[in-house]
Image (cartoon, rainbow, N blue to C red):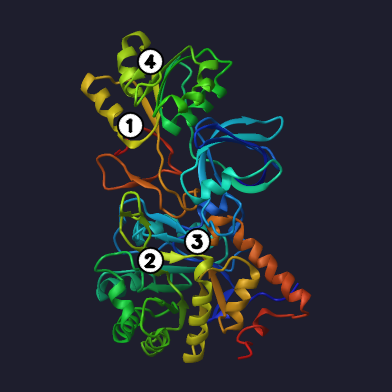
Amino acid sequence: MANLKVDLCGVEFKNPVIAASGTFGFGKEFNEIYDISCLGGISTKGLTLEPRLGNPTPRIAEGDSVILNSVGLQNPGVEAFLREDLAFLREKEIAIIANVAGRTLDDYAGICARLDGLVDMIELNISCPNVKCGGMAFGIRPDSVLEVTRVSKEALLHTPLLVKLSPNVENIAENARAAEKGGADAVSLINTLTGMVIDIERRKPLLANVTGGVSGAGIRPIAVRMVWEVCKAVHIPVIGMGGITCAEDALQFMMAGAAAVQVGTANFTDTLAMPKIIDGLNRWLDAHGIADINEVCGTLQA
Amino acid sequence: MKELQAKVDSNEQIAPGIFEMTLRLTEGIDFRCGQFLNLSVGDGSRLLRRPFAIIFYDPSACVVGVCYQVKGKGTKLLSAKKTGDVLTCVLPLGNGFMIRPEQKRVALIGGGVGVFPLVSVLNEYSESDKHFRSYMGFRSKEYVNAFSMFNKRSDVTWIATDDGSFGSHGTAVAEFFRDYKNARPDVILACGPAPMLRALKSGLQERGIDVPCYVSLEERMGCGIGACLVCVCKRAGTEENVRVCKDGPVFNIKEVEL
């Protein structure tokens, strides 16, 4: 058994496999199927200061090897999370990343201040494409990425800050550099790509919100390319995600330079996807005579 | 709930575009009527599973049955599955139907593929002291095949078709209200398209009928286990959502906005 432990910004993850925000709730439902303490960590459902109802339904659609969602940040609010979910996750002894979103810079500063010291990491959702007049604006341009990162970082005294980057931008490496300049301790990518599916009989979009975020195996090559570009552009740790379904997929991201990975849509296809990926990483490392997962990171020959 | 492999036992067309599939599970489950499973369609390009009501569970053989309509690429792939093919599923999911001991007379109202979740009620209570009256609505006589499942165990079954090609010309809800005085149900269980459930809700209100009424809802789902918040509906009179897959799919008709 190889060492799977990774360290990001002083936070220890027992392995590099983290549940991606929005696909895993706060872990309780999946824990009914398997003990989630085997995971490296969890990025929570996106939290806002106040509870949110989200978008109308249908909120999900399917394409070839991809899905689209437009849940629209439905969440119980940060106070409900602290009251009802945090203690459960603490018991599981996994790294807790609170994914947070806001409509204004004050929202981001406020929610970061509220969570400071209570979770292991904070992940800024500046790229959720689903809320009108919401997060999208912050994630598009490098100057606003820098600004929202700076304001959030100033509100944090104890908890490292992770900024989740949108792929729906001109140059993702430039936005990563902006996050780093703004004080981000790490970046994660990619969030979903904006897409659309049409029901030709009704001549209507399948999603009630018209457009939604595309995720799943079909976006993986785009995600790997963007992670590779970002890893070359910044000096802070990178968490890679986008269409990971198995250990071999995860290894592509890590060879491109990611220190850890997140898994989202694969949890829908197979509820045991993440334990299988962790097991697969162990087997791959053993088969290749590698004693430590960290030895794989950034070893791409290109 | 469990993540299990499921081997296809049979997969047969029972009406135009409607299939009945039986699946042999690798281990037993704890099942109650009205619960569902989330089934892979056995093709790597379809990332979402399909949620289907379980119409029966045979614990001695660990076999479950589902019925589905071919609607898109996923269900089309499913319809081509052969005996021995291996799929995966999570089950049992959702809360299911509950009939209290004192509720003896049960009305079942189903429209289209919405009749199938109700079949599991008849199967579960087949040896009980319950009396069932069933009201089924279909598009036309070609689809009526599904009602043979009802005829076996329901005391009375009324059929309506949209085009009048079988049974009466009209809807299952209209049949139910026509028969209401004879039926005097203690509880009403219903499943079908949203317009049907809305007609039932307003019909009960207009007539001042306060018999407990439970409906099984359908919504496009992601995870199927309550984590992703994709399949929600509004809790009536509140600014709060409920999850169809986890808090439902069965709700008191007064509890949800249809």
Residue that numbered label 2 is attached to: A195
Which mark is nearer the camera, 1 or 3?
Answer: 3
Q: Which mark is residue B102?
A: none
Between disc 3 and disc 2, whose residue precedes? 3
Contact flag, marks 1 and 2 (Cβ < 8 Å): no
Q: Nearer the viewer, residue A10 or B256?
A: B256
Q: Nearer the viewer, residue B220 or A19?
A: B220
Secondary structure of the residue carrying numbered label 4:
loop
Q: Tell me the subunit letter for badge 4.
A: B
Q: Find the distance from the CA under tag 4 to the CA under tag 3.
A: 47 Å
In the rendered image, residue B24, in percent from the top left (x then y), is placed at: 68, 38
In the rendered image, residue B46, in percent from the top left (x then y), is placed at: 53, 56
In the rendered image, residue A109, in percent from the top left (x then y), is placed at: 30, 75
Residue that numbered label 3 is attached to: A64
Q: Which mark is residue B185?
A: 4
Q: Nearer the viewer, residue B252 or A118?
A: B252
- Name the outermost residue toward the top: B182
Q: Amino acid at mark 4?
A: Pro
Which mark is nearer the camera, 1 or 4?
Answer: 1
Quarter placement of the N terminus of chain A:
bottom right
- Compared across the picture, whether A14 is left or right of B47 comes to right
Q: Tell me the subunit letter for badge 1.
A: B
Which mark is nearer the camera, 4 or 2?
Answer: 2
Residue that numbered label 1 is attached to: B197
Q: Residues within 10 Å of mark 3 (few under 14, many from 20)?
A: few
